[in-house]
Image (cartoon, helix red, strand yellow):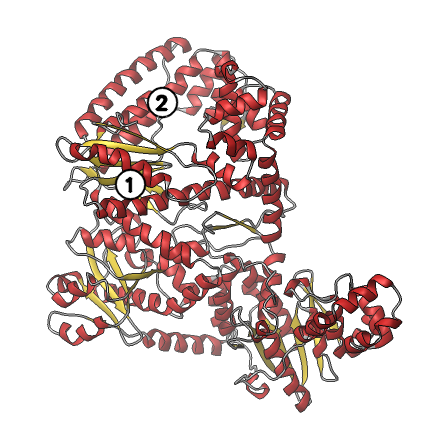
Amino acid sequence: MGHLVLIDGNSIANRAFYALPPLSTSSGLHTNAVLGFTTMLLKVLEEMKPTHLLVAFDAGKVVFRHSEFTEYKAGRAKTPPELSEQFPVLRELLDAFSIHWTELTGYEADDIIGTLTRQADASGLATTVITGDKDMLQLVSQHVSVALTRKGVSELEMYDEAAIREKYGLAPSQIIDLKGLMGDTSDNIPGVPGVGEKTALKLLHEYGSVESVLENIDAISGKKLQENLRNNVEQAKMSKTLATIFREAPIEIETEKTTYAGYNGKVLVDFFKKLEFKSLIPKVKVSAEDEAAAEEASGEQAQSFTHEVVTQENRDQFAHLLGSPMSFTVEIDGENYHRAPVLGFGLASAEKALFVPVDVAAGWEAFSAWLGDASKEKIVFDGKKDTVALAWHGLELRGATLDVYLASYLLNAAESNPTLADVSALYSELRVASDEEIYGKGAKRALPSAEKLGEHVARKAAALWQSIPAVKREIEAHQLEELLFTLEGPLSLVLAQMEHTGVKVDGSRLEAMGIELDKQLEQLTTQIHEQAGGSFNINSPKQLGEVLFDKLGLPVWKKTKTGPSTSADVLEKLAPYHPIIEMILHFRQLGKLRSTYIEGLLKEIHPKTGKVHTLFNQATTATGRLSSTEPNLQNIPIRLEEGRKIREAFVPSESGWYMLAADYSQIELRVLAHISQDANLIDAFQKGMDIHTRTAMDVFGVAENEVTSLMRRQAKAVNFGIVYGISDYGLSQNLNITRKEAAEFIERYFAVFSGVRKYMEDIVKQAKQDGYVTTLLHRRRYLPDITSSNFNLRSFAERTAMNTPIQGTAADIIKLAMIRMQERLQAEGLQSRMLLQVHDELVFEVPEDELETMRKIVPEVMAAAIKLDVPLQADVNDGRTWYEAK
């Protein structure tokens, strides 16, 4: 009659995800759950040879059981984005296998499978359920077997009625009684306190059911057990109800409609290639018929996407579409949207996908009006980029309600800078080619034909439109709405304004600095050659190694494939051995300043504005910090005086204006005080003490006037090191002391700041339990290595767990401050402009008559960005250059 196989999709995916090590494609898509699922599928097809096959998925977290018990599944950890992003891919996988799959809003996979096994029982169809969930054992019957996954998903353990009786001494129907008594922590089913599996089985062997156990409490031995049962009668009954799989789900698919006729080998191989599952390709059988059918299907699919190109002649017939919500993309010719020309626009809704060439858009008043109308809803992908690119063309973008680029980043911050091709692969049925596929790479980059360009841009917009429901669902499921809509979304508009405004850089000053650096480099070269006893190429590691180790006989600290290492960390260890080392280190620092920051900045001055327009990267770091590129202004080496002086070239763009810089004072330590609730740290900040002096006083047991500069320096190293989970080895390297001395120092610190120690211990435990840590504003960072058996991976994850809530919260705070600051500037009608954000610092250009106002309101707004148990403080300075404002 046949063989029906029903697969619990969520259960198998979960088990595969946690059983297999992290795995991702070259584009960054996580695939370990999909790979585990695939290997299980191939095995099932080969060994069970199903004639009917269906995979059932949960359709969201809200199920009817919540109305009976609001805490149902409340204890279950949120699904990591690394797994969430694989569920759309799993559905694609099943389509490639030609396997039916289904989900039903408000119900779980269990209920779908329970309903189908009831139908199978009625028809006498032999059925196997594949799951990792023991609850499913209740479905076992004369016709239904359950295969439980073991060793991840690589092995299956079969259960029929005899196997359940042998293992538990129960009938399948009594599995719900077992769960009713012992509960299930994974689903937050409470059961009876103090009753585990052993006790529950003993009771059921004697009394048969939950109800019978509860009727015979007085006859049960054990006073404490009797008391627990008596106090939890209703809870036990409710737990049994919760554990009972609902077998009357209103599903539209019936068992006879789950027929499985096999897969098309060519389609499957192509899908495996896409996911880079090279090892599985040889296991797939591909026939000539498969090849032909796949080509025909792909041709039909390619033709199924249609778009319209808007022209000067036909544009009026599309104007009515601009009244409804649409997805919107801006296509530019290059990466840097401050310089690259706009090629055209993509617009899409359920009705149409359009490509609007830039020359058509230029004269289309209805389009310009729609763009700038805040009441017309637009879904965008990287609204900051779009806003700035349009601003260079004199156009304004308003009314962007959802930025799918930022949403995708928040869902998986470990995968930085997602592309629309990446996101559409997860959330849309439309395949979008990467820009590299369309334009080519490097020297081969070229504009495609007008036809190909129009199709690509319209397809992007259509895929973006299709992605909206799934992205919204994921954002809600991970409770990221507030972070997206009140922080990252508004911030992107602030950053767009800052980027477009730019900051004036005095090229002549930079050139003068370059000449001065050249002189210093020349002098250093002479001195190094004198010390070496002859000339050589200082920039050649090989020649430098010969001088240091062969000629001067310095000790070799580390070897590479090409010889002894001359890396910076090695040179620092060699510094006490010879005066040439300090000269070489200084030579390298000045050389980097010359090439990276003098020449680099000169190249980035925009020819139209005389300013640099850095790109603030909002979706790059795992902690939520901003970074900047083209140029990178976060990494100007300000520890070196010559590096600090580069800031002299950053000047106001208006005559007579000033630069004003505001820097959060020790924000990470203040966040640490708040999060850890350490009494001594909180006390120090509330009293306005210098935290490093206070730490030295407490750790060394001295009065404030007895704290030496060395004591304060050591205390400072520990204060900042603690935030990053510093080890005794790390501290010994920083302070040039022994590991024993460093360990003693850390121990004294923790004795004084015991709340900090408790926080660090607790956060690591929490991370191991949840798999992630959060900032105060609920930004998540997932830590898959927190339970790794590899010491180095686990240790790094533990340090990350300690640091991310602190560093990430500090990053969120300055982002909030930027939003509030922009609002304040507009509310007070000030001309002052916010130009830069660098770590914990905000930089403005200010008219002279607004200096007093800005000196007052900037630290005020920054201090009020968030309410902590210790005061936030921002130090403000101003001057004619950024250098003077520090």
Q: Residue sitting at 36 percent across and 46 percent down?
A: 816
Asked whether 159 or 133 is in front, the reply is 133
In the image, residue 207 sits, relative to residue 603, either above or below, namely below
Q: Quadrant of residue 440?
A: bottom left
Q: Quadrant of residue 214?
A: bottom right
Which labelled disc corresponds to residue 640? Answer: 2
Which labelled disc corresponds to residue 839? Answer: none
Q: Quadrant of the N terminus?
A: bottom right
Asked whether 569 or 616 is in front, the reply is 616
Residue 564 appears in the rendering: no
Which labelled disc corresponds to residue 630? Answer: 1
- Considering only order in the chain, which callout, 1 or 2, is on the residue closer to the N terminus? 1
Q: Position of residue 848 (x, y in %)?
A: 17, 32
Amino acid, disc 1: Glu
Mark 2 packing: few (<14 Cα in 10 Å), some, or many (20+)?
A: few
Q: Quadrant of residue 600?
A: top left
